[in-house]
Image (spheres, grey):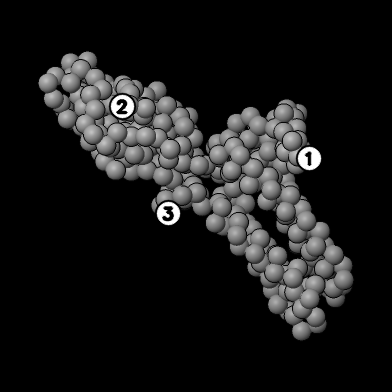
Amino acid sequence: MTFLHELVRRIECFTALDKVAKPVAGFVGRAVRPRRVRNLLSGTSIGHPLHPMLTDLPIGAWSMSTLLDTVGGAGAEPAADLLVGAGILSAIPAAVTGLNDWSDTIGGETRVGAVHASANVTALGLYLASLVARRSGRRGRGKALGLAGLGVLMVGGYLGGHLSYARAVNVNRTTFEHRPEEWTPVLADAELGEGEHRRVSAGEAAVLLVRDDGQLYALANTCSHAGGPLDEGELLDGCVVCPWHASTFRLTDGSIVRGPASTPQPTYQTRVRDGHIEVRSTG
């Protein structure tokens, strides 16, 4: 195990962070609870989380400011300063969307996310100090602060990458399901009454089967956002609400009514044949 892997493992197990991280995550969760806020910050309308794409803006701006500070000479100083300011401004929406995503994490993910956020806030503070120093004519100090900010930013970026690629935070949990393309019997028709829903198996895939207003609906049972079991959720106004983070999906087409989910729920075609309900993937 490399030093970095061991360091992250220690952060994941450092339960003392919970004393601060849990209350803050709870506060953020309450702040983003309104549907419009949740959908906006989660990237529901664009089809994937918003935070990762927004982080490219401050990282790119601050990285290029360091490059100009290093090799650009006196003529590049105005451009370097502009990039520092642009990075500061773009870091704010990146931070807000990141907090939104972090509020849904648990355990080790929450602890790593707290250190990730702390590193990025520290980097932001260093770049703010760098901009102040540059504006007051202390360019050497400004460059040094910017370089320090970039170093801290890289630490935050590494931890963010760990959350995405090692812990699969905000990764579509239905991507690797093997959904049957042929009609597959899943349940006797008489076993599902009006207004009832049930988890069934279609080959290797878990399926949520619902009879609502005389119609049969079938969706992937695993919530695309964080893997919550939709069969344990509530049916409400033609939708199913995930019991973990309240992502809400329409039964008709799996579209998202409320985040934090940003990927629609996979759906199945349904039919009744020889007294059995059959399903097949819609593709």
| Residue at image point 24% right, 28% down | 184
Q: Quadrant of the C terminus?
A: top left
Q: How far, Cα to Cα, is label 2 from label 1?
A: 43 Å
Quarter of the view holding residue 251: top left
| Residue at image point 47% right, 32% down | 227
Q: Is residue 20 visible?
A: no
Q: Is residue 43 visible?
A: yes
Kind of residue sitting beneath label 3: Ile
Out of 2 and 275, give the one closest to the viewer. 2
Q: Disc number at residue 28?
A: none
| Residue at image point 75% right, 74% down | 68
Q: Which residue is mark 2?
A: 202
Q: Earlier in the sequence, mark 3 or mark 1?
A: 1
Label 2 crowd (10 A; few <14 / some 14-19 / many >=20):
many
Q: Which residue is mark 3?
A: 46
| Residue at image point 61% right, 62% down | 57
Kind of residue sitting beneath label 2: Ala
Q: Which residue is mark 1?
A: 3
Question: Residues at badges 2 and 1 in contact (C-beta under 8 Å)?
Answer: no
Mark in front: 2 vs 3: 2
Looking at the image, residue 194 lies above or below residue 33: above
Out of 146 and 36, give the one closest to the viewer. 146
